[in-house]
Image (tube, rainbow, N blue to C red):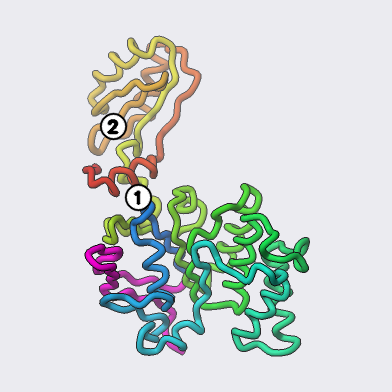
């Protein structure tokens, strides 16, 4: 059996003069959940389609478990489960008949095909709508049907384009729980622009923009790039007076007051929380909130994709 791995090798896609994906290379191994992040139009969905063989690259290739997606496309696709953007399906078919059709298309026959469809219905909590026509379902239910067809054959590699798009909070929780449960012995690549997915699901995150890879790091590593990492925020009476005093601390690099919150940024290598806690006690300030900032992923995302300097 070939090694469980995805390799993107200088993947590029051009549409005339438009470069949608530009020389993208990376590897993903077993047990990893890779969050593929970027603004709308960054090239995320195009990359997903090339990884799965649904779209031919202009140059470069991808290798899925040792099988080249161009030269050995059928073998590569057999180990893949793919949830495309929008998850197109046969709207006139019922949920059950569609999933049984997918099972047969995947090579299952007879009772096994029926069991595979039934199992997918149960795992995605579709038991209330198995005989309902797909076109009559809500967006959230359609998304769950799309995910059901992607996992039906228990693939080694899952490529999921916006898997929680259109789901309500409870449905998002259920789908994220399922993805986490499946992740230990699979490769899962999730394309998303929802930053909370990174915290909820991913062991690794890549940010792309204009088809180029900008950052490849762990979620904690990304957050640590935020200027808010290890900063301390207070909600305090007389914030201007407090800001003036805190700005004199040798451990503080900068103090900002915004929307009633006072944020103190640490000087390089300094830790502020205990220092500021001591200052609060010393001066007797009335503080309603005092928190240590982990960092703000939305800020890192914005700065990276707009080409601004971070840290």
Relative image position of residue 193 (x, y in whole percent): 43, 52
Give the overall secondary structure of the magenta segment: strand
Relative image position of residue 67 (x, y in whole percent): 39, 86
Relative image position of residue 134 (x, y in whole percent): 68, 65
Answer whether residue 241 is magenta in the image.
Answer: no
Relative image position of residue 102 (x, y in whole percent): 63, 79
* Residue carrying label 2: 266
Query: Residue 103, located in which quarter of the rendered image?
Result: bottom right
* Front of the two marks 1 and 2: 1
In the depicted view, which residue is nearer to us: 228 or 122? 122
In the depicted view, which residue is nearer to us: 22 or 281? 22
* Residue carrying label 1: 222
Query: Residue 26, located in which quarter of the rendered image?
Result: bottom left
Q: Which of the two discs, 1 and 2, labels the residue nearer the N terminus?
A: 1
Q: Is residue 289 left or right of residue 97?
A: left
Answer whether residue 24 is magenta in the image.
Answer: yes
Q: Which mark is residue 170?
A: none
Cα separation between marks 1 and 2: 18 Å
What residue range appears in magenta?
1-30
């Amino acid at each position: 059996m070939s090694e469980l791995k995805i390799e993107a090798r200088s993947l590029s896609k051009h549409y005339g003069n438009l470069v949608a994906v530009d020389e993208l290379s990376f590897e993903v191994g077993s047990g990893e959940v890779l969050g593929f992040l970027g603004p709308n139009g960054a090239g995320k969905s195009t990359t997903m389609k090339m990884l799965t063989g649904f779209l031919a690259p202009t140059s470069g290739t991808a290798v899925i478990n040792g099988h080249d997606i161009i030269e050995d496309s059928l073998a590569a696709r057999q180990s893949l489960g793919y949830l495309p953007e929008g998850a197109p399906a046969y709207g006139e078919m019922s949920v059950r008949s569609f999933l049984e059709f997918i099972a047969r298309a995947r090579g299952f026959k007879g009772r096994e095909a029926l069991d595979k469809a039934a199992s997918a219905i149960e795992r995605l909590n579709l038991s209330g709508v198995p005989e309902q026509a797909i076109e009559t379902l809500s967006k959230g239910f359609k998304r769950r049907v799309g995910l059901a067809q992607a996992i039906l054959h228990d693939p080694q590699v899952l490529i999921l384009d916006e898997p929680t798009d259109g789901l309500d909070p409870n449905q998002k929780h259920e789908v994220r729980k399922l993805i986490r449960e499946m992740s230990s012995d699979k490769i899962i690549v999730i394309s998303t622009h929802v930053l909370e997915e990174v915290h909820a699901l991913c062991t690794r995150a890549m940010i792309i923009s204009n088809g180029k890879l900008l950052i490849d790091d762990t979620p904690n590593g990304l957050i640590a790039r935020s200027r808010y990492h290890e900063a301390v925020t207070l909600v305090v009476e007389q914030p201007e007076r407090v800001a003036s005093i805190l700005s004199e601390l040798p451990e503080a690099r900068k103090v900002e007051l915004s929307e009633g919150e006072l944020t103190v940024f640490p000087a390089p290598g300094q830790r502020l929380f205990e220092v500021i806690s001591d200052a609060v006690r010393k001066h007797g300030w009335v503080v309603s909130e005092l928190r240590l900032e982990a960092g703000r992923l939305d800020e890192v995302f914005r700065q990276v994709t707009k080409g601004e300097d971070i840290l």
